[in-house]
Amino acid sequence: MTWQQTLADLETGKVRAAEQDSSGTWQVNTAVKRAILAAFAAGDNTEFAGIYRGFIDKHNLAAREFTLADQVRMVPGGSSVRAGTYVAPGVIIMPPAYINIGAFVDSGTMIDSHALIGSCAQIGKHVHVSAAVQIGGVLEPIGARPVIIEDNAFLGAGVIIVEGIVVKKGAVLAPGVSLSASVPVYDCVNQVILGKGADIPENAVVVPGTRPVAGAWAELQGLNMACALIVKYRDDSSNAALELESVLR
């Protein structure tokens, strides 16, 4: 399949950079990633005209344009959705926000101001992406899993998720939570250490925390490093915002 066809299929949702298999495990579609890289290689830098006058990018990766038929509410004010991105009907994009190539944003999801959806990230249905959330792109290495946010998750303001972390269905992340391959996750409800780069379980309510830095000098200085704390599990009918309010009081 050519890179041109792959980009077209990405925009209709026919193909995705990652999908769940029959067991529910997320699998990377390396053919899609290779096609995206081929598109970059085939493109030449060009000056854009119209509302994008003054911007320079690959000629074959211009920003998408939406019509009423797409049923996407993209509010004016500086947002951009790159070519090769799927944005489902019912998605709301508040300005300014950016959605990069290969990303998949499913129906009913809200992308708030100053949010970034990185390349190949997979965002489920009815996800709330609050202001200034940063979801990192994972285009390379080819086989690396992108960031996955499953259905009905709630990401509070300023949340950072990178390096292929999976946030399972219904999980709630409080403002300021940072998740990466080097950040350990502690389940305070079940009293277990899930470890560095762990998937966030379904319906988990997560808040930012710290843990002491090892070593006598670090202890003397009172140094701590970031971690993520699961402090509660919500039921499917509870309101994510109210759950956060109750645990943060």
Image: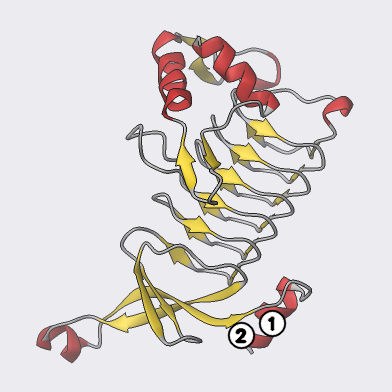
The answer to whether the residue labelled 1 contacts the one labelled 2, judged by CB atoms less than 8 Å apart, is yes
For the residue marked with disc 1, what is the amino acid? Glu
Q: Quadrant of residue 218?
A: bottom left
Residue at 44% across, 55% down? 165
Q: Is residue 237 left or right of residue 184?
A: right
Residue visible at 41% across and 29% down in the picture: 30
Label 1 crowd (10 A; few <14 / some 14-19 / many >=20)? few
Q: Is residue 53 visible?
A: no
> Residue at image x 58%, y 72%?
174
Residue holding disc 2? 248
Image quadrant in which you'd find residue 236: bottom right
Q: Amino acid at mark 2?
A: Leu
Q: Which of the 4 quarters of the picture holds residue 130?
A: bottom right
> For the residue labelled by badge 1, is the local secondary structure a helix, a strand or a loop?
helix
Question: Which mark is on residue 245?
Answer: 1
The C terminus sits in image quarter: bottom right
Q: Is residue 244 visible?
A: yes
Q: In this image, 134 relative to 80: left or right?
A: left
- Can you give x and y, in whole percent of width and height, for residue 179 in the image? 43, 62
User: Residue at point 54% right, 31% down?
Assistant: 102
Q: Is residue 163 above or below residue 61?
A: below
Viewer-side residue, 181 vs 93: 181
Q: Nearer the viewer, residue 79 or 211?
A: 211
Report the disc number at residue 236.
none
Q: Is residue 204 above or below residue 24?
A: below
How far is mark 1 from mark 2, CA to CA? 5 Å
Counting from the top left corner in percent of width and height, residue 219 is at: 18, 89
78 versus 109 height, above or below: above
Q: Position of residue 52 (x, y in %)?
A: 64, 21
- Would you call the spot at circle 2 few (<14 residues within 10 Å), some (14-19), or many (20 or more)? few
